[in-house]
Structure formats: structure tokens, C-alpha cells
Image (cartoon, grey):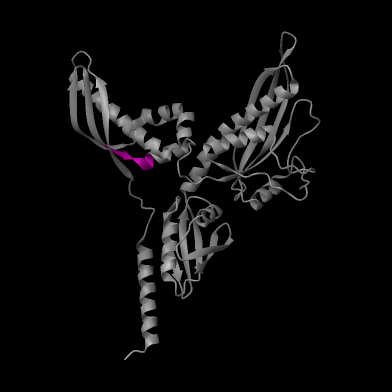
Amino acid sequence: MFDQNSIKKWIQRIGLLVILVLAGSSSFGADTRVVKQLKVLGTAVIHEKNLADGRQNAVNDALVAAVGQVVMEMLTGETVVRRFQQINDSILAERDNYIQNYRVITESVSGNTVRTLVQVDVAVDRVSRDLSRLGLALAGAVYPRILLMVAERNVADPGFTYWWGDRRQISRTISEKALAATLQATGFEVIDPPDLSAPLSLPVNAPEADMLALAGRLGADVLISGYCTAASAPNTMGGDTNAFEAVFEARAFNVQTGQPIGRTRQKAVVSGQDEVRGGREALSGAGSLAGDDLARIIMAVWQQEQDRSAVIEVVVEGTGGHIANFVRLRTAISSLSGVNDLKMRSMSADSADMDVKYQGSARSLADALLLKTFNGFGIDIFEVTAEAIRIRLVNQ
């Protein structure tokens, strides 16, 4: 006969074995083609009673509509509006690159119009890949957190204004504010200037290593550093209307690696009678232009890097006697946007060790997990490094 303790230990071992088997069989990053099947209508006019050509034109219309529907589901509405010409030229005009298969279900002819109902298989992974390469903001994508360090000088200003210098300043400059607004509209998270108890006293042209270290401490994934300068342009009109131009030059860096992502140089020119107001308008315009350009550059490079999906180690402590809670946590991690795969490395009596293949940094994975809520327990994310996250179950 077995005593009660022996039976309890045997049941726990069986439970652990079942979890490990289930964990090893799960894979969220399968290599098979991702295809979405749609039923769409296509319409075309019949010219010179040529029904065959009209029918084919209606089918072609349906194929474009199918690819367009997938694009609309993948992008934010604002991105579609802002980048529609690019989407049309690079994606919709190349629809055959994304059509896996199609079948005409039925058709109807009314007068000189033919309509077809077509079942279309769209390779959504190819659409997603090419949208990312164009630097377009995918809905639900994992975006990097950006820190801006842009020094600014308006017309007649004696020197540059910047928040990391000798004076305590928590508000953004004009050009930085415009840059931030454009990046945020595209979908990026822009970190606010820190509210410091004392100035940082860094020079305007602080070494890259110092700026990257500061960006890392503030939790940024990407650093944008540069200058924006406004000045009077030589053109005038009527003796009292002048031209003012602002030049924005900046570079973007991957904070974790220190490697440059890209650079931009933008110029905005405005007219006016007041040099301060004209300079401000030019600074704002240059900031917006730089934001558009940098958003495209950063998103394209970032997505390519994330497509390689770094493997992040996730260690969970406090699992002993609370296996069900661990399973719910594991399920929540695997369901997060950007998680491509999750595999168990090991499991002991009171901890579990997992490898998570994630399109983003360990910090962004931790931030996403922090927003999850659970019935009956909580989590304490007590350590986050570049390659690992350590979590403690808070069982209630």
C-alpha cells in the first residue's frame, strides 16, 4: 500500500510530465505559409459585347479587392491614408505576388456590367513582410520606444536649447514636439523628457556612448539625436515679407546594439514678416518632415530585425503547488502579439524556465506582460535584462 505522501508526490510528477509534453509540442512560429481565404465581389464593364474580357476584368477587380482587404486589416487607418500612394504602387499593383489561389464561384450579367463572386486565397505573410519592408505601421505590431535628443536654435537665438544641458527643462522644443507628434501618429511610443531634480549638464554634442547610456536607462529601444536650426533665407517680397528656413539633421540608433539605424536631413521654408514666428513655423515643419522620414526608416529596419525574433529566457518562480496558475501565465505569454514560439527549457519543483521567441526586446515583452491580469494570482516581474525576464508568481 502507498502512503498519502507517496501518492501526492506521484501525482505531482505526472502533472509536471504532462505540462512538459504539452509545452514541447506547442509551436506558435510554424514555417508553413499563412493563407487567408476570402470571398469578394468584382465588377467590370463589358466593352463591345466582349463578355470574356469583361469577366476577366471583374475577376482582376476581385483579386485587387482581396489583397486590399488584407492590407486594411494589417494597417492602422491613419497609415493607409498617409501612405495610400505607396500602398497602391507597391502592393495593390503587384497583386499577383500575394494571390495563392482563386476560384470563381458565380457571376451575374446585367446590361453591360458583369459581377463575379470569387474565392481568393491571399498569402498574408507575404503581404505583412512587404508592408514591413516599406516601413508601414502594422496594426498590433511591436513598436520600439523612442527617446528624442534634438537640440534647437531659432532665428536670432544665441545658442541651442536642449533638455540634457545645464538648465532644467522638461518641455519639448518646437521641432522635437513636431517630430514626436508625427512618430506617435504613426504608432511609435515616444518617451517624455525626464523630470530631473537636477540638470544632467551634458554638452549639446554629448558623445554617442553617453546618449545611448542615457536612452538605455530611460527604457528606450531607439535613440534619435540631432539638431534643428532656423535662419532667415535670402528671399524677400515687397520689402516686408521674408523667407525663413529650418534644417533638421538627425540620426537614429538601436539602443541595445549601439548601431545606427538611419539618418535624415529635412528642410522647411515658410514666409512671414516676424522672424521669431516664421522661425517657429519652419522648425515645426522641418520636425514633421523628419518624423515622416524617420518613421519609415526606423520601422523598416526595426521590423527586419524583429523578424529574426530574438529568443528571450523567461524564468518563473513560485510554481510549486500552483501549476494551474503557471499554465495560465504560460498561455498568456504565448498569446501576446509578437510571440512566435514558446518552448520549455526545464522545470523544477518551484520554478520553470522557458525560451520565448519574440519580435521585440525583453523590456517590451515585460511591458506587455505587465498589462495582463489573472484571476486568483498576480505576477511580480522583478528582473529584466537584455536577454532574460525573471517573474515571481504572487499566489492569492
- Residue 261 picture quarter: top right
Residue 101 in the image: above or below residue 285:
below
Question: Which residue is drawn at the image coordinates 62% and 34% (left, top)?
Answer: 179
Q: Is residue 268 left or right of residue 94?
A: right
Residue 28 at x, y percent in the picture:
38, 55
Question: Which residue is drawn at the image coordinates 52% and 63% (left, top)?
Answer: 379
Residue 382 in the image: above or below residue 37:
below
* Quadrant housing the N terminus: bottom left
Residue 190 in the image: above or below residue 238:
below
One can see residue 323 in this view: yes
Q: Which residues are magenta?
A: 120-126
Q: Is residue 299 magenta?
A: no
Question: Which residue is drawn at the image coordinates 37% and 27% (left, top)?
Answer: 93
Q: Is residue 243 left or right of residue 292?
A: right
Q: Is residue 192 left or right of residue 60?
A: right
Residue pushed farthest top?
238
- Total labels drawn: 0
One can see residue 294 in this view: no
Q: Is residue 267 left or right of residue 85?
A: right
Residue pushed farthest bottom?
1
Residue 247 at x, y percent in the picture:
67, 27
Residue in the foreground of this view, choosing between 91 and 158:
158
Residue 121 at x, y percent in the picture:
28, 39
Q: Is residue 122 magenta?
A: yes
